[in-house]
Amino acid sequence: MDQRDVRAAWQKFIERGTLSGDVRSTVAASWQRSRQHRITVDRAKAPLVAEDELARQRAKHAALRHAARSALQNSKTFLRDAGSIMILTDPTGLIIDTQGDARVIDAGRTVHLEHGGRWSEADIGTNAIGAALADSCPVQIHGAEHFCTEVQRWTCAAVPVHDPNDGELLGVVDISGPASTFNPQSLALAVAVGHHVESVLAQLARQDKEQLLCDFIAKRASWATEECILLDRRGAILHATERGLRAMKDNGLNTDGDAPTRFLKTVAFEDWPAKLREILPHASFELVKNGNTGVGAIVVMHARRRTPGERSTAAMRGRDATPPRQAQASQPAAKPAGNKTPRFVAEDPNVLAIVRRVEGAAARKMPILIRGETGTGKEQLARHAHAASGRAGAFVAVNCAALPDSLIEAELFGYADGAFTGARSGGAMGLVKEADGGTLFLDEIGDMPVALQGVLLRLLDDWTVRPVGGAAFKVDVFLVSATNAALDKAIAEGRFRSDLLYRLNTLEVRLPRLRERCDFDAIARQLLHKIDPGCAITAGALARLAPNHWHGNIRELGNMLARLTLGVSNGIIDEACVDAMIGRAIGQPIARPSPDAEGSLHDVQRARILMVYAETNGNVSETARRLGVSRNTIYRALGQPRP
C-alpha cells in the first residue's frame, strides 16, 4: 500500500474500528494493541523519564551499552548526513543511547525521540521500537503506519536484541528518521547491527566463563570433599555434578527446570551473598570478579551430617549418586497412550522409536551420539539414557564449547599436585573420574579442539584416565555425546577426526525439530507443569501456538510458556492470552513493503534480497536458499566481501 492508502485505512480504523485487509498484519495488530492501551491519536510526544531514572537505567544496562558502543560510534560517520539516527533502548522501550545525524537528533526532541523517551506501544502507540518489543521480531514502520499523528512524520526500523545465552530480551536497536528518508534497507541494517551487538555479548560471556573456569579449577581442590556449583553472572549453572544438584534440591530448590538461581541476573552483584544465603543457608560462596565487574560465583554445598539411620539406608542402596526419581525414569519408555517417562516426552511414534533404541544401547553401555538442532532435548534424552542404563554413578554433563582450549584436558582428566602454575595443592579429580560408575555426557562435541580429540580417542581405547602430571588409572564410564554441528563437514575440513566419530556413534540418533513432531501438546503441557504447576493451558491456546516455526524448538516453547504464565491471573492460558502476548497469528509471515515499481530492476532485486535477509534475521545461507540464488549474490547485494 502507498502512504495515501495507509492513511485512509488508518482513518477508517480510528473512526470505525474496522481494519482494511490490505494493511500489513504487523501494523494492524499494533493498531489494535494501541487502542487496547487507550492511546489517543493526538498524543504529541512519548513520556520522558527524569534524569536520575535515566541514569539508573543506563547503569543497569551497562553491558548492553558496552556491546553496542562501537556500532553507535560508527553510526556517527555513516548516518551523519543520511537524515537518520541509530537508537538503543532497554527492554521496556526506554531510549538509553542515540547517535547519527545531529539535525535528526534535534528534531527527535519534539516527540521525545531522545534519551529518556519511552517508546513502547503502551506509551506512544504503534512505532517500530514498540512493535519489535511486542512481536519479538524485526519491524519497519513508515509514516502513516504509526498510530499517533505527530509520530507519522517519522519512519523507523527496529530489531530486538536478545541475550545470546538464554534468549532473554535485552533491548532494541532502531534506525529512525523523517518519513521522507524512508529506505527499505534500514531494516536490514538494523538487523545487522543487532546481530553485531549479540555477537559482542556472546564474546564477553565467553571471556567471563573462561575466567570463572580458571578460578574454579585453581581453587576446587580446596573443597575436595564438598559439592561445588559454578554460577555465571546470569545466575545460570555453568558447572555442577548430579550430586551438587541433589544438594540444591535437598535445600528445597527445584532443579528439574531452569536454574533456580536465575533470578540473580536481576540482583546487584554486591547483593549476591545475602540473596544466596537466603536460598542456600548451609552453603558458602566465593564471588569472582573481573576488575570491578562481577562475573559469577562458586557455591560450595557443604555436606550435611547424616544420622546413623540415614547412613544405614545409604549403605543398603550402595553408592548414593542416583536419586530415587532417576531410578523410576529407568523404566521402559512411554507408550503413546500417555504413560510417559518423567524426563522425556515420547508420544510421537518416531521419537518413541528413538527412545527405545537409546534404552537398548544404554542397557549395553554402547556409546550414543545424539544429533539435533539447539533446543530439541538432546541433554534430556541423554539423562534418560543414564536412567535407563541403571548405573549407580553420577550423570556428569560437560559443555565442550564452554571450556577454554587450555583447560579442557585438565577439566576432563584432572591434574596432579603442582602440575602447572596456579594448580591448587592436592590436584583435581577431573570430570571423567567424577563420572566413574555413571555417565559422562559430552555436549557440543563438535566444538572440541582437534588436539584434545586425540586424547579423548585414547581414553575410549582402554578407558584409562591420564591426569595432567599424574598417574594413570582405569574408569568405568557410559559415554553419551551430543552435537548440533555438521560433523561430516567438520571431518572433510579437518576439524573433527573421523576415527573419533566412529567410536562415539555406536548408536547415532537424530532428534526431530519441534515443528516436525506430533506430540506438541504433550510437550507443552509437561513444560508448563515444570514452569508453573498451578497453571493450565486450553486446547485452543495450544492450537494457536503449534503452527509457529519454533526455530528454538522446545527451549523456545518453554520461554514462550514462561512469559504467558506471567500474563494470566486465573491460572489458565487461553487463546486470548496467546493473542495478547503475540499480537498476530503465530507462523504468519511478516509482511514487508513492496519495492518501488518504478525503480530499476537492480534496485528491485536488491530491495527484495534485503527484505528476505531481514526476515531470516541476517542468515545469508537461508536468504540464498529462499531466493534460489548463490551466497555471492547475497553478499554483493549487502555490499559485503565473501568471508
Image (cartoon, rainbow, N blue to C red):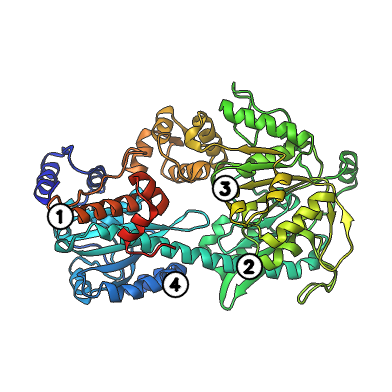
Identify the residue under disc 2.
Answer: 210
**Going from the N terminus, do you reach mark 2 or mark 3 first?**
2
At label 4, counting other C-alpha atoms closer than 10 Å, the crowd grade (few under 14, some 14-19, many 20 or more) is few
Identify the residue under disc 3.
Answer: 484
* 167 with respect to 140 (left or right): right
Residue type (three-letter) at the residue carrying disc 4: His
Is residue 40 something that shows in the picture? no
| Viewer-side label of 3, 4 | 3
Residue placed furthest toward the top: 337
Helix, strand or loop at label 2? It is helix
Residue found at x 90% / y 47%:
308
Q: CA distance from mark 4 to mark 1?
A: 39 Å
Identify the residue under disc 4.
Answer: 66
Helix, strand or loop at label 3? It is loop
At label 2, counting other C-alpha atoms closer than 10 Å, the crowd grade (few under 14, some 14-19, many 20 or more) is some
Q: x, y percentage for residue 616? A: 37, 50
Q: x, y percentage for residue 322? A: 78, 42
Q: CA distance from mark 2 to mark 1?
A: 51 Å
